[in-house]
Structures are given as C-alpha cells and as structure tokens.
Amino acid sequence: MTERIHNFNPGPAALPLSVLEEVQAEMLHFKNSGMSILEISHRSELFGEVLASARNRARRLFNLPDNYRVLFIQGGASLQFAMAPMNFLGPEDRADYINTGTWATKAFEQASLLGKKVRYAASSEEKAFSFIPKTADLDPKARYVHITSNNTIRGTQWQHYPDTGEVPLVCDMCSDIFSRPVPVEKFGLIYAGAQKNLGPSGLTLAIIREDMLHWNPDAVMPTLMRYKTYSDHYSMYNTPPCFGIYVAEKVMAWLENEIGGLEKMAALNRAKAERLYRALDATDFYQGTAEKEDRSPMNVTFRLKNTELEPVFIREALAAGLGGLKGHKSVGGCRASLYNATGMDAVESLVNFMDDFEKRKG
C-alpha cells in the first residue's frame, strides 16, 4: 500500500500529517546544526530550546497555575502506577482508587504490590466496565483519589470529574490528554503516555502540583522514581527522551496554532464522535458496548450483531484503507480510536464503509 490510510489505531496512534512532514523535513538537518534531532546533545542550546518550548506549550494549553510543574519522564504511563504511590504514600497514608477498567485495575495492583494502603472506592466491574460510577465511597482522609480519565479498552470516559473535596485527584490521562480543557485545580498529578494524543511512545508527560513534590520525603526509592528529581533538574537529570519531546512540542504547536486551543479541539472531537455514534445507533447491525451517557469520544467500541462477521469487517476495512479497527485482545470486537489527529474525513470514510458492509452482509 503506497497511500496513507485512515488510522484508527489505539496507540501508538495517528499524528498530525503536518507534524510528520515537518519532522521529515528536519530529520537530517535540524535548525542549521548539520545534525539530525536524533544526534544533537541533550545538553545543547538547541535542545534546551525545544524542551523549554514543550514545557511552555503544555502550560499554555492547560492554562496551568504557577504552582504546577511540567515534567517529561521515560518509562511509559505504566511506570506511573508505581511512582505515584511511592511518592505520595507514607507508611500510614492511604489512597482511594476508582476502578473503570484494565488500566485503573493495573494502577491499583501496582500500589498494592508496594504494600500501600489502597482500596477501591467505586468500580464499574459489575457491568464489564461499560459505565463510569456515579457515586463513590470516598475517604476524606485519603491522600489522593486515583482515576483513569478515559477507558481505551471499554470505550468510556469521565464526562465530569468526581468531586473529591480537598483530596486531590491523581489521573491517568493517557488517552485523552489535550483533547479537551481540564480543570487542573482538581488534580494533584496528571500523567499521560505520549503515544495516543501527544507524540511517539517512550515519553510520559506529568503535570504535578508543586507541594506534592515534597510529600513522603523520607521514602527510600530510586532517584529516577522521585518526581522531585525531574522537577529539580528540569527533566534533565539523565538523558531525556529527546525525540519524543521534540515531536510532542510540534504536536502542541499544532494544537495551539492550527487548531486554536483545547476548546476548539474538544468541539472537533465531539463532532467526530457524534457522527460515528449516530451511525452505530441507526441500526442494530452494529452495537455500541458502552453506556450512552459515558461514551468516550476518543475510543468508540462496538460489536457486530453477528460476531462471526467481525474478522471479515476488520479485514475488509483495512483493504479499504481503514486501519486499526480491531478491538483489544481482552474483549474482542471493534474499536475506532478518534484521537486528535484523526480527522472527520476518516470518520466519514468509516461510516460509509460501515453502511456498505451492512448492505452487503446484513
């Protein structure tokens, strides 16, 4: 296949074409340096400018208050499942977790593995994680409440973040980071792997409230597991994921300059999702798997009424230039990930294919 396809992959996922073209143009000769961005020193002035710009763009996009720090960390968001409890929970501290699916479960398991005092304050497991809990048994003395803002596997999203009072939210925002405005003051920590809405895999963005850098100061942990290390050294204690930061800076520039900010990005994302959900709801040939009020605009999960047709649907879709529609291996079915860089043209092409497939197979 010589043409680019419509990319519905759940991650690594679609990046803006203009960003890919800019990366391509600069690959061999970055900023008149005579070197590729892959070759320049992370201690160089050139990379320092990239890092500072990435940090500042993240601050502007989220309109961050002065008491929040922007950190760039390696290890993927799964590492944060352990870093957060290690940094925030002392021997007598406890935390609440709200379980909305696989990644929320994994976060809880890592905290438990470390021997931390954590518990589920709410869960949607009773209905196969097809909804977001509307109530939770929250502990007012908990150190934090952990949530996963968007469930990539089951196709649900927190439309309204829970009210946790004075207890800060710690949030895995991997699959909807920068897809909409966020009331940052509710959060003590936001973390997100870059590979869905921000850049290539291998980079994690963390946004942390400054006072939380000093929680649990006596904990014994590796230097690179401590958030304060990244804050004190401007994410440069060791060699950072330079290429990932470079691409993320360009994606954030695209969000600022081409899209016009997160309000406009959110409107585009709503329009894309509504178009696809309307198509799903117009027939019983396709069946959405998430409760309607909690449907994710990022990951649209669905089954075919005749599940034996699903492999055929996925295969023929790929042949038609629609890639990445296979559901997660743990649940099967189909999934269309509509991240920021996936345009309405891709959604229209998918809807047209779905209509044609139903006419041929229904």
Image (spheres, rainbow, N blue to C red):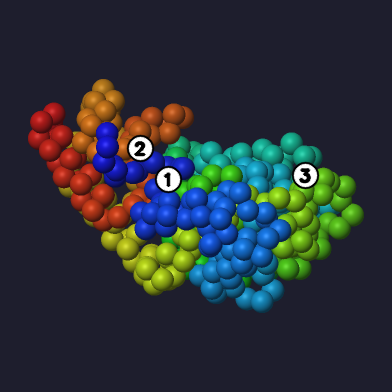
The furthest residue to the bottom: 66
Q: Where does the image place residue 165, in percent across and percent down from the top left? A: 64, 68
* Circle 1: residue type: Ala
Q: Is residue 38 above or below residue 257?
A: above
Q: Residues within 10 Å of mark 2 (few under 14, many from 20)?
A: many
Picture quadrant where residue 155 is located: top left
* First along the sequence among labels 1 and 3: 1
Q: Is residue 96 above or below residue 355?
A: below
- Give the left or right position of residue 77, taking residue 357 as reference: right
Measured in 3D between alpha carbons, the distance from the residue under mark 1 to the one under mark 2, in whole angstroms, is 9 Å
At horizontal 19% and vertical 40% (from top left) the residue drawn is 354
Give the labeled residue for mark 2: 324
Viewport quadrant of the N terminus: top left
Q: Dot 1 lies on which element?
A: loop
Tags 1 and 2 touching, CB below 8 Å: yes
Label 3 vs label 2, nearer the camera: 2
Give the labeled residue for mark 3: 116
> Is residue 297 in sight in this rendering?
no
Give the labeled residue for mark 1: 13
Closest to the observer, 350 or 299: 350
* Circle 2: residue type: Gly
Q: Which mark is residue 44?
A: none
Q: Where does the image place residue 244, in percent across and percent down from the top left? A: 56, 51
- Give the left or right position of residue 75, taking residue 328 as reference: right
Q: Residues within 10 Å of mark 3 (few under 14, many from 20)?
A: some
* First along the sequence among labels 3 and 2: 3
> Is residue 332 in sight in this rendering?
yes
Q: Dot 2 lies on which element?
A: loop
Label 1 vs label 3, nearer the camera: 1
Viewport quadrant of the C terminus: top left
